[in-house]
Image: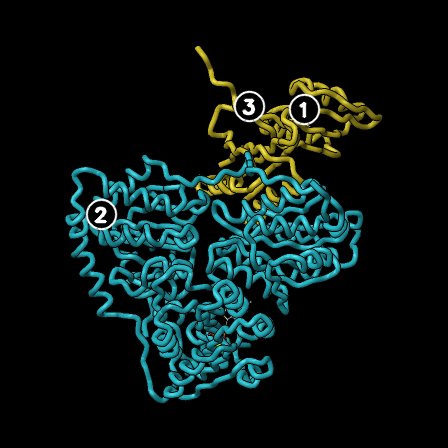
């Protein structure tokens, strides 16, 4: 086979890995790669800040399940990407980040635009590589994709010295990847499945507690089948929303700090907690000593470190969620002597209790026609998108209201930075999602603070015809922090007032987008309708009730049953 | 509880940082750490001694195993095992203490490896407790410098009757 440059080989390899779109920003160390990309049909999205590139690749990965790819230059290009990488890492998003590096001969010399990005990113990548030898180049990139998408997914960084990318190589044949030290467990152990099923048979008050792992393994169907078959109520983490239809009567909504009254009560009272692809995060459990104290716990997760990390588990099942849920379904379908109707009926009294909780304390806000309530904005967005839009969010109150009031019926439709809580995530992630699905409605539900963290990506959206819609729930505050100050710091609003802000409508226009504003409740619906009918980027600036809070709320360190209600 | 954990890993650049970064980043403690090549090319064995309750040690072993370059993790303390550490001690040895130092070293089956007019450098090998004992005994005589290797360990072969 003829020789080609390292850069050409990388592009060829990306094609082989199924990459159609990459997000990036050029610089001296990656000129060769950009040059080679010009001759390929991979869409190369030029963002306006490297953080945006990584979030956009992340957004694409979350809605498609494919590996997102970002390409950054050395030094500041790479460091600008770190927040994006950490965001993907905390939410286990499959991603490959290619960074340029100074030529090998200069590494370690404090060369111009040299940073040890492999060292910097080590604790926030699933794995990373500095390629040292030309013959390692393509095998390393292949391995990076394999590691990123297999097992518990995550971002993988490959650092590429400039001289290496510029040198010649003969392209190696594709081979099966063999890694003796990395072999994720995909199939559940039958003994554990049997144990789990017996516990489920015995339970009177079971709860399914579902996290992002179910979505990562595309197990929504298997989960839904199990819940409905056995009549088990379901609660989801922020990352799990959409894994089970939010409008189904078995859905109790989200649990944890801003979870529903029903979900938190049900977890506190259940006698069996079936955790699937969730990791008992502190925002979910509240005070650990009081979490699910009456329950035995089954935990399905592909990552053994997640099991019994925070909460001792009775039946651990190390497996891909999809395979484990399918195995549970098969067990109940095929085991002789099991009457599924009887199984389902056994949970009826429990379900009645749950319904009583929901009737007593549903998700609720005091609507008021003289102001715009943020929850009303979300409900109206839901109504006019038929619940079918892809929703990305920024971080703060806007994110929690979106999670609570947009009832997600489908997986991969809610794109939010859960683990890291990265303000500035929503807009670039929306661009990534829109690039993947040009015909879908993609809405970034934003706060007035967060949107300013990556506002420059409006230009990217414009350049690539991504008609994303941005709904700013504008309270002129860093609202979530203000809410904590209101409740726990005697209303001392230190550094959370954002009265000085751009005119978002004018700002939209400056970027060639459409700006719309609603200052009263009756303007909300027309603004949303107009935005959804516009084939351009639209910023909707909703001047909401400034001191509206997110409720229910479990104060940090308190038990989940000690919720503050509206 | 003290645990001695043996880790087989791919000898790749940065692999030691991955291990130590894991311990520091997650607040696990390292009492000692030793690493060197095995018979197999490209594979190293790392022995780390740490302290923690059962849950912490379980997390340490799982987290180590999760590192992509780690091949195998064994908590040797779960088995019958032998552990060894070596120490080099430079101890004051003047005319009135020279004999005493030699006697102590002999009891601990140590060796003198360097001699000067005023000191001996001695080498002692054994489990960590023995190393500690020899240090405690020599201390009143006057230790000028010590260097310890940290513990290495190996599971005992299963006993056959
Ligand atoms: C990059 C980053 N910096 C700081 C924070 C801390 N933080 C969490 S929510 C929040 C306020 C966000 O304000 P805004 O975007 O206006 O959203 P609101 O809560 O008002 O809806 C802040 C500062 C964060 N999550 N991310
Ligand atoms: Mg705000």
Which of the 4 image quarters holds residue A27?
A: bottom right
Along the line of sight, the residue nearer the viewer: A281 or B132: A281
Disc 2 secondary structure class: loop
Residue at image coords 29%, 62%: A252
Chain letter for the part of the structure drawn in yellow:
B
What is the x, y in percent for residue A413?
41, 63
Question: Which percent across, then down, holds residue B150?
Answer: 63, 32
Q: Which residue is disc 2 drawn over? A: A203
Q: Which of B41 and B134 lies nearest the eye of the viewer?
A: B41
Circle 1 is placed at which residue position? Answer: B124
Residue at mark 3 to residue at mark 2: CA–CA distance: 47 Å
**What kind of element bears circle 1?**
strand
As measured in the structure, the alpha-carbon distance from the residue carrying label 2 to the one carrying label 1 is 60 Å
Q: Chain of mark 2?
A: A
> Element at badge 3?
strand
* Cβ of mark 2 under 8 A from ligand 1: no
3 or 2: mark nearer the eye = 2
Query: Is any atom of residue A501 visible in this view?
Result: no
């Amino acid at each position: 086979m003829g020789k080609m440059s390292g850069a050409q080989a990388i592009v060829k390899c990306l094609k082989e890995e199924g990459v159609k779109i990459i997000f990036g920003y050029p610089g001296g160390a990656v000129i060769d790669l950009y040059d080679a990309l010009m001759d390929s049909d991979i869409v190369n999205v030029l963002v306006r800040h490297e953080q945006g590139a990584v979030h956009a690749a992340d957004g694409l990965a979350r809605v498609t399940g494919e590996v997102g790819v970002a390409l950054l230059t050395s030094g500041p290009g790479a460091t600008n990407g770190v927040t994006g990488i950490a965001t993907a890492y905390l939410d286990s998003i499959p991603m490959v980040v290619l960074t340029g590096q100074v030529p090998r001969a200069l590494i370690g010399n404090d060369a111009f635009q040299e940073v040890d990005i492999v060292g910097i990113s080590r604790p926030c990548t699933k794995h990373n590589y500095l390629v040292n030898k030309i013959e390692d180049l393509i095998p390393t990139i292949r391995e990076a994709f394999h590691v990123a998408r297999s097992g518990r997914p995550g971002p993988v960084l490959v650092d590429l010295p400039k001289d290496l990318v510029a040198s010649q190589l003969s392209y190696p044949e594709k081979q099966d990847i063999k890694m003796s030290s990395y072999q994720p467990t995909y199939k559940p152990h039958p003994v554990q499945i049997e144990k789990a099923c017996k516990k489920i048979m015995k339970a009177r008050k079971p709860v399914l507690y579902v996290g992002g792992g179910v979505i990562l393994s595309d197990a929504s169907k298997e989960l839904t089948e199990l819940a409905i078959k056995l009549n088990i109520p379901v609660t989801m983490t922020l990352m799990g929303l959409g894994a089970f239809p939010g409008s189904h009567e078995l859905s109790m909504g989200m649990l944890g700090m801003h979870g529903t009254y029903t979900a938190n009560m049900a977890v506190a009272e259940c006698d069996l907690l079936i955790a699937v692809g969730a990791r008992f995060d502190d925002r979910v459990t509240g005070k650990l000593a009081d979490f699910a104290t009456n329950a035995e716990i089954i935990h399905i997760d592909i990552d053994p470190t997640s099991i019994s990390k925070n909460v001792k588990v009775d039946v651990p099942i190390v497996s891909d969620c999809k395979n484990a849920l399918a195995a549970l379904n098969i067990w109940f379908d095929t085991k002789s002597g099991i009457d599924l109707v009887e199984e389902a009926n056994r949970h009826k009294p429990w379900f009645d209790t749950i319904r009583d909780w929901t009737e007593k304390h549903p998700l609720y806000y005091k609507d008021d026609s003289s102001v715009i309530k943020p929850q009303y904005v979300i409900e109206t967005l839901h109504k006019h998108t038929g619940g079918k839009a892809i929703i990305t969010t920024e971080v703060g109150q806007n994110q929690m209201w979106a999670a609570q009031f947009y009832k997600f019926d489908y997986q991969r439709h809610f794109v939010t930075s859960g683990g890291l809580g990265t303000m500035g995530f929503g807009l670039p992630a929306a661009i990534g999602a829109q690039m993947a699905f040009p015909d879908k409605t993609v809405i970034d539900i934003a706060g007035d603070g967060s949107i300013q963290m990556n506002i420059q990506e409006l230009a990217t959206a414009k350049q690539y015809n991504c008609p994303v819609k941005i709904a700013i729930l504008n309270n002129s505050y860093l609202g979530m922090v203000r809410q904590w100050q209101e409740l726990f710091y005697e209303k001392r609003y230190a550094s959370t007032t954002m009265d000085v802000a751009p005119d978002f409508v004018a700002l939209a226009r400056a970027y060639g987008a459409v700006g719309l504003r609603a200052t009263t409740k009756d303007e909300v619906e027309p603004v949303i309708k107009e935005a959804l009918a516009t084939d351009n980027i639209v910023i909707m600036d909703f001047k909401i009730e400034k001191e509206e809070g997110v409720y229910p709320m479990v104060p940090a360190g308190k038990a989940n049953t000690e919720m503050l209600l509206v | 509880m003290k645990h001695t954990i043996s880790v087989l890993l791919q000898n790749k650049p940065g692999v030691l940082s991955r291990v130590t970064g894991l311990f520091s980043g997650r607040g696990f403690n390292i009492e000692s750490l030793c690493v060197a090549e095995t018979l197999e090319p490209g594979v190293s064995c790392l022995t780390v001694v740490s302290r923690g309750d059962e849950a912490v040690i379980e997390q340490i072993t799982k987290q180590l195993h999760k590192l992509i370059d780690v091949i195998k993790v064994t908590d040797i303390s779960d088995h019958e095992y032998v552990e060894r550490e070596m120490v080099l001690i430079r101890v004051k040895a003047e005319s009135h203490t020279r004999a005493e130092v030699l006697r102590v070293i002999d009891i601990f089956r140590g060796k003198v490896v360097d001699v000067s007019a005023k000191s001996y450098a001695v080498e002692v090998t054994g489990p960590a407790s023995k190393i500690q004992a020899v240090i405690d005994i020599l201390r009143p005589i006057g230790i000028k410098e010590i260097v310890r290797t940290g513990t290495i360990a190996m599971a005992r072969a299963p006993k056959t009757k």
